[in-house]
Amino acid sequence: MKLSYVGVDLAKNVYQLHGVDRYGKVAWKRRLRRGQWLQALLDNAEPGCEIGMEACTGAHHWARELRS
């Protein structure tokens, strides 16, 4: 099932991801390392998925990566 909404807790090495489907049902919870989370998210999110991150300097970097 593809994810419609994802929340990301950014950290230095391990990131927590929480995703829900289009009906708001929890469909995905992952604890991934820095080098793994972006590809895992891209593999499981549907186009137009809304991604929420905390407001920090690292979030700006990851937002640019997700846009590209």
Image (cartoon, rainbow, N blue to C red):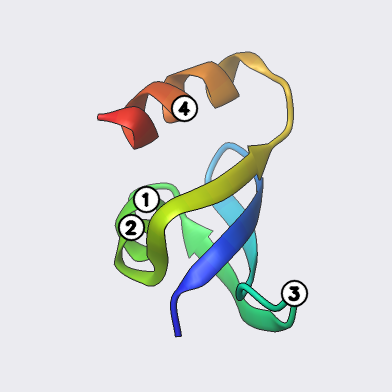
Q: Mark 3 vs mark 4: give the one in front.
A: 3
Mark 3 and mark 1 lie on one chain; the one further toward the N terminus is 3
Distance of mark 3 from mark 2, alpha carbons? 19 Å
Give the residue drawn at x 39%, y 64%: 46
What's the residue type where badge 1 is placed?
Answer: Leu
Q: According to the image, label 1 marks what residue? A: 38
Q: Mark 3 vs mark 1: give the one in front.
A: 3
Q: Residues within 10 Å of mark 2 (few under 14, many from 20)?
A: some
- Residue 56 against residue 32 in the figure, above or below: above
* On-image quarter of the N terminus: bottom left
Give the residue drawn at x 46%, y 27%: 63
Tell me, yes or no, whether the two marked residues, 1 and 4, touch with CB atoms within 8 Å.
no
Q: Mark 1 vs mark 4: give the one in front.
A: 4
Q: Nearer the viewer, residue 66 or 12?
A: 66
* On-image quarter of the C terminus: top left
Q: Residues within 10 Å of mark 3 (few under 14, many from 20)?
A: few
Query: Hey, which residue is sitting farthest left in the picture?
Result: 68
Q: According to the image, label 3 marks what residue? A: 24
What's the residue type where badge 3 is placed?
Answer: Gly
Q: What secondary structure is found at the residue carrying circle 1?
A: helix
Tell me, yes or no, whether the two marked residues, 1 and 2, touch with CB atoms within 8 Å.
yes
Q: According to the image, label 2 marks what residue? A: 42
Distance of mark 3 from mark 1, alpha carbons? 22 Å
Say the numbered circle drawn on residue 63.
4
**Residue 18 in the image: x percent, y percent?**
67, 65
What's the residue type where badge 4 is placed?
Answer: Ala
What's the residue type where badge 2 is placed?
Answer: Leu
